[in-house]
Amino acid sequence: MSQVIEDKVIDEKLEWSRINADVIASMQAPRKAYWVTVFVCLTMFLCAIAAEIYQYKMGLGSAGLNNPHMWDMYIATFVFWIGMSHAGTLLSAILHIIHAQWRKPIYRFAEAMTTFSLMTAGFFPMIHLGRVWNLYWVLPYVSDRGIWPNFRSPLVWDAFAISTYLSSSALFLFIGMIPDMAILRDHTTGWRKKLYGILCLGWRGDDRQWRNFRRTYMLLACFLIPLAISVHSIVSSDFAMSIMPGWHVTTFPPYFVAGALYSGCAAIMTLFVCLRYFFRMEEYMTLNIMEKTCKLTFAIAMVWTYLNLIEFSSTWYGHNIYDKEVLIAKATGPYAAVFWTMIFCGCVVPFTLCFQKLRRHMPSMFVVSILLNLGMYVERWMIVAPTLAQAHSPHQWDVLWGSVIQWAIVFGSFGWFGLLFLVFVKLFPCVSMYEVKELCFHLKHEIEEEEKAKKHATTKAAGKAEEGSGRTAPGTPGLEGA
Amino acid sequence: MSRHRLLAMFKDFDDAFDVVDKIKAKEVSGVEVDDINMMSPIEHPNVDEKLGKRPINIAYFTLAGAIFGVTFGFFFLSSAQASFLVQPQGGKPVVPLPTNFVLMYEMLIFFAVWTTVICFIFLSGLGQKRGTLYSEKLTVDEIGIVVEIDDSELDSVKNFFKNNKALEIREEKV
């Protein structure tokens, strides 16, 4: 079988009208499991609302936050959600720039994931503040006493970086959806038609629009990549710019970026399995695409593992006693079980992705992706909690496991994200219709060209053979004759 | 003399490109290749080759947005810092460049992205009122060629399209 046919991620013979019909039908009639998941997410979110109301009334003490544990799970969860947002950038922007065709059927939901995980992440600094009403102090706004925020603080950089990233990724998602909005405008009725009619901004698909669209999309992709890297580097600066043991590490920015890409990929795998089932997308979210996603995840998992080793060894050989004690405490102290869960889920579980049978088995991939996500969540917790539990002064040493309030809010954040995401995929196509058409178009032409080339080669070979036999015939003995 | 706009629909890109080639070869009068607008459900990779290179000016605006962002970022931060001398500086400069670079970088991207998107909307003619010459099949699988012609050429151009595998022809008065 030829390489093009073997590697093809979608059936190129899919008719364009069928692509439209399938995607639109999937949005209108998902499986029952979709509604069950919406209900579960809503319940989780309501738990978080109740917990937040309680915390708002009783103060941060009810969450168990106190000196030295002033950050704990809230900031670990904030870092986790920021990390998740890198999936869209990786799958959409980076793979778009390198012309990886297989991203086309699945990049839309990865982009949506970016936007919604940023929206979820944005809640945690607010929740963790306690005095939510003072959030505007972070904004670049001069108070009536002439005081500006401290622009030297990475916490203010966070506010700038995250708001830039959120607006840019939302625009990137929106621009990429315009041609699909036009398809929906033309092929739906009622309120949907009105909604998509407004959102497609009058797209007609003429050559001027396509040319500008392509250039704009490419430019946005080019900006989004350095932006994503800067966002997570800045988030890592929240830790690395302090002098706390375990945080003051030079490799933190790349470590954070790799961790972000890793958790993003794992989340893509989870959502891939769910969407494929909920919306009957087996023909679009194919096993070949899952395989490629798994391979990418494995590669990033190995980078993350390597950066972990670098961090451990530089602490070990660095001879900074405080850093070393935190490292030893992570592996043997009260948080040891969590630490080894992180190592198992983050470094060992990805090796299951080496097996093709597993990569093509959706239930297994669902479990594996959940384990990877678990590993990446506890990784963030392992960054925050052990350092706070064992800072420089022994009088500050204290182990904290987070109160029910903290757990409920963290748990509910997954419900909030899930809810946003599920509403999005019900309202907007999770598979990009025009990109899938492009993919089919190119694939068809590639296969045709390859077949032509093969035919040409066969004819040429036959011609040569004839020529050869013709040459040996007169006078010279052939092999048999010899 | 009044003018008409015609939309001819074709089954696929090959049929539409054949028509473009014939227009280029002057097989029909009153239509130039520069007047052709091609509407399609996807962007064909060879569309520039067939219709000729047409300008895309978005990147200039992106550059302008980026320059504005970085300049605005610098002046905004430094003016805020310079007017806030109450804050203890601890021997550090009032306007610290290394930390400001981070925020200037963010502002560069912020303004560049917004400028790009706004210019895309304007330069693509999105959000503007257009004529009624459109078919829903253009977002399914058919390719449309739009031309603007004088009344006197209307019949000959229509016949030309019909003889060249046009599935449907629509027209409107300009």
Image: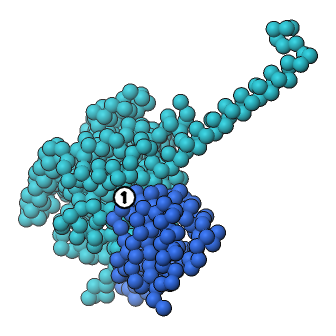
- Residue at the spot x=20%, y=53% of the render? A28
Find numbered disc 1 in the image and state the secondary structure of the residue it sits on.
loop
Q: Of residues B52 and B152, which is closer to you in this image?
A: B152
Q: Is residue A273 left or right of residue A87?
A: left
- Residue A397 seen in render: no
Q: Of residues B107 and A203, which is closer to you in this image?
A: A203
Q: Of residues A466 and A427, which is closer to you in this image?
A: A466
- Quadrant of the rendered structure where residue B20 is? bottom right
- Figure check: A138 above or below A384: below
- Figure check: B105 above or below A271: below
Q: In the image, residue A292 lies at what x, y percent?
A: 44, 40
User: Could you say which chain is coloured blue in the image?
Assistant: B
- Residue at the spot x=88%, y=13% of the render? A477
Check disc 1 and give the amino acid type. Answer: Val
Q: Is residue B61 left or right of residue A388?
A: right
Classify 10 Å Cα crowding around label 1: few (below 14), some (14-19), many (20 and above): many
- Residue at the spot x=75%, y=30% of the render? A463
Q: In the image, residue A266 lies at what x, y percent?
A: 35, 43
- Residue B151 seen in render: yes
Q: Of residues B37 and B169, which is closer to you in this image?
A: B169
Q: In the image, residue A18 lies at what x, y percent?
A: 33, 49
Q: Which residue is mark 1?
A: B140
Quadrant containing the C terminus of chain A is top right
Task: State how the image is colored.
Answer: by chain
Q: In the image, residue A389 lies at what x, y percent?
A: 28, 48
- Residue at the spot x=82%, y=11% of the render? A479
Q: Is residue A417 left or right of residue A340?
A: left
- The single residue placed furthest to the right in the displayed view is A475
Q: Colour of chain A?
A: cyan
